[in-house]
């Protein structure tokens, strides 16, 4: 009997990132007969709500918590920065998990981009699952060019920004993380 394709999914820390990945994993298992392993970085102990979600998974979806990373200096940071730092600090533990099984792919979200290099080193095809709306994707893709052409703070722009495929948006309405 042929073995099912086994996909590793690297979720960013937090239940808000895990739930969409779990739903995605269920679709792959139920409609495409894949086996999935959710790899979850954490700082501190995994929250009870996260454990409860993971306990309800079908048998074709496994989960692995990476060793908790130090939360030193994270408490005062914005949540997005906490997630990014946690992902970076978790990377040294990832190769061991990826080597433990013959994975056919690694799927990451936007905070897991650095893991793409690990996957390539291990000859595992990497994929990005973008969990946000089209506006966020357009902004993310065009932000480097916007940053080159704008000479003031985004919130001080006199005209709305025009992003491909999106309605114009005032700079003051961009997320706080981008304002800095």
Image: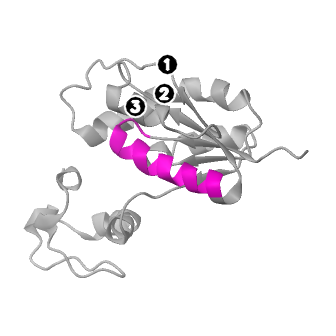
The percent coordinates of residue 121 (x first, y second) are 71, 38
**Element class at badge 1:** loop
User: In the displayed structure, does residue 77 sit left or right of residue 130?
Assistant: left
Mark pair 2, 3: CA separation: 22 Å
Single out the mark in the foreground, 2 or 3: 3
User: In the displayed structure, does residue 81 sit left or right of residue 41?
Assistant: left
Q: Earlier in the sequence, mark 1 or mark 2?
A: 1
Residue in the image at 49% along x and 46% along y: 22
Look at the image and tell me whether residue 152 can be seen.
no
Q: Name the image quarter holding residue 154.
A: bottom left
| Residue for badge 3 | 52
| Residue for badge 2 | 90
Q: Name the image quarter holding residue 127.
A: bottom right
Residue in the image at 66% along x and 24% along y: 96
Q: Which mark is residue 136?
A: none
User: In the displayed structure, does residue 103 sit left or right of residue 64?
Assistant: right
Q: Is residue 133 above or below residue 95?
A: below
* Magenta highlight range: 12-30
Do the CB atoms of the residues marked 2 and 3 lie less than 8 Å apart?
no
Q: Main secondary structure of the magenta part?
A: helix
Do the CB atoms of the residues marked 1 and 2 lie less than 8 Å apart?
yes
The percent coordinates of residue 56 (x first, y second) are 48, 37
Q: Earlier in the sequence, mark 3 or mark 1?
A: 3
The percent coordinates of residue 175 (x first, y second) are 20, 57
Instruction: Choose between 133 and 117: the one closer to the eye.
Output: 133
User: In the displayed structure, does residue 32 sit left or right of residue 10?
Assistant: right
| Residue for badge 1 | 67
**Element class at badge 2:** helix
Magenta segment: does it hold 16? yes
Mark pair 1, 2: CA separation: 7 Å
């Amino acid at each position: 009997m042929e073995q099912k394709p086994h996909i590793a999914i690297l979720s960013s820390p937090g239940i808000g990132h895990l739930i969409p990945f779990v739903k995605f994993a269920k679709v792959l298992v139920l409609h495409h007969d894949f086996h999935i392993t959710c790899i979850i970085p954490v700082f501190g102990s995994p929250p009870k709500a996260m454990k409860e979600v993971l306990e309800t998974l079908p048998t074709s979806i496994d989960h692995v918590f990476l060793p908790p990373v130090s939360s030193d200096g994270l408490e005062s940071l914005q949540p997005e920065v906490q997630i990014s730092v946690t992902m970076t600090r978790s990377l040294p533990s990832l190769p061991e998990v990826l080597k433990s099984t013959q994975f056919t792919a690694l799927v990451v979200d936007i905070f897991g981009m650095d893991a793409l290099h690990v996957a390539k080193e291990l000859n595992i095809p990497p994929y990005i699952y973008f969990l946000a709306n089209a506006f966020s994707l357009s902004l993310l893709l065009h932000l480097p060019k916007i940053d080159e052409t704008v000479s003031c703070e985004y919130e001080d722009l006199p005209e709305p920004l025009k992003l491909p495929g999106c309605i114009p948006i005032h700079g003051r309405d961009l997320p706080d993380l981008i304002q800095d």
